[in-house]
Structures are given as C-alpha cells and as structure tokens.
Amino acid sequence: MKKNLVIIIILLAAYINIKGQSAGVSLGGGLISSNSPSVSSYSTSIFLESPVLFNSFSIRLSILYAADYNQILPNSTIKYNPFIKGVSLKGLTTQNYSGSYYLDEGIGLLMINDRIFNNSDFIDYGFVMSIGAGFDLRNDFPTGFRIGAGVDYGFTFTNTYANYFSLHLIGQYYF
C-alpha cells in the first residue's frame, strides 16, 4: 500500500502540464505531535506545482520536514530531537486580486513518517489543508516570483495520529 501511494504520486507529478509549472520553498515554525503533547518545531518544505484546469486550479506535490527547535540551537544537550517527514499531494485554487495580491487555498492527501519518539518509525496517512496569501511579482508575465505567507495543517488517522501545524514564509518561481 505504501509503495503504491508513492508510485501514484510520482506518476502524477511526471505527467503534469509543463506550461505554467512552478517550484518553491517554505520555511517557518509550528507544532508537531503524535501520541504526545505538541512540540515546538521549525518546518521546511519544497514543492512543485502545475496548473491542471485553466490557471486557477493546480496540483502541488510537497515534501515536508519538521523538527524540534532544539535541533538547530547551539549547545543543546538533548540527544534525540523529534521530527516528522512527509509527502503531500494537494489541489489548490488561486484567486488573483488587483495590485498583484493573491490568495491560495488547498486540500489534499498526506503521508507522514512519524519519528516523534526515538523508538518509533511509523507511516501515517491523512489529509492536509493550507491557505496562503502574498504578492505576485510577475507583473502579468508568465515567469517570475511570488512571495507570501501561509498556514498548513496536516493530520493523520492511522497508527500514531501524527499531525503538524506550520506558519511559514513562501517563495515560489514560475518557469
């Protein structure tokens, strides 16, 4: 089952429309949890996005990494820092407003590798929801940058019920 889901995601990403594709990164902070209290974390993700229907609906394939803040703090004496890794496939809608502003909303499927505890290594499946807003710096050109801020919430409903919340900055480049 796990391998089938990964193969489907890779095939979908390979056959997505090339025109209007974009790639981006996000960096921020939030919370991760499992069968435990929430842990403050930093999060980062990289993504590929491609329009499917017109230019207002697109599919985004994301790879997420979120870990305890202690991992990046100097002089930390903690031997194990909780983290999660994930892959998501979201459908996004985009509203463009005058003045080069935009609003994105998305919902999709999520697969998380839960490593909250040092003796755990579970794969959990669930859903992810996101919303983002920012500035479109392309000035009506097909290529260029968009910058903004967003919120992601991912939750699972198998094994350890891993979930994450991320408030982040987004940078995206259109090819």
Image: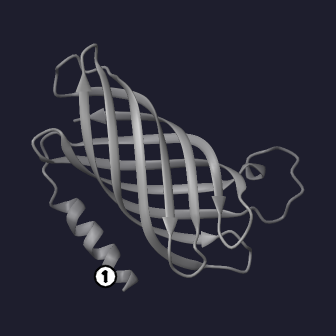
Nearest to the observer: residue 7 or residue 126: 126
- Where the C terminus falls, by quadrant? top left
- Where the N terminus falls, by quadrant? bottom left
User: Would residue 139 appear left or right of 64 to someone viewing this image?
Assistant: left
Q: Percent x, y for residue 38?
A: 71, 59
Q: Tell me the crowding category of disc 1: few under 14, some 14 to 19, or many 20 or more residues within 10 angstroms, Cα based.
A: few
User: Would residue 66 appear left or right of 9 to someone viewing this image?
Assistant: right
Callout 1 amino acid: Asn
Furthest toward the bottom, the residue is 1
Nearest to the observer: residue 12 or residue 53: 53
Quarter of the view holding residue 34:
bottom right
Q: Which residue is mark 1?
A: 4
Nearest to the observer: residue 14 or residue 104: 104
**95 lies above or below 100:** below
Furthest toward the top, the residue is 99
**138 lies above or below 57:** above
Question: Going 26% across and 73% down the picture, which residue do you hit?
Answer: 8
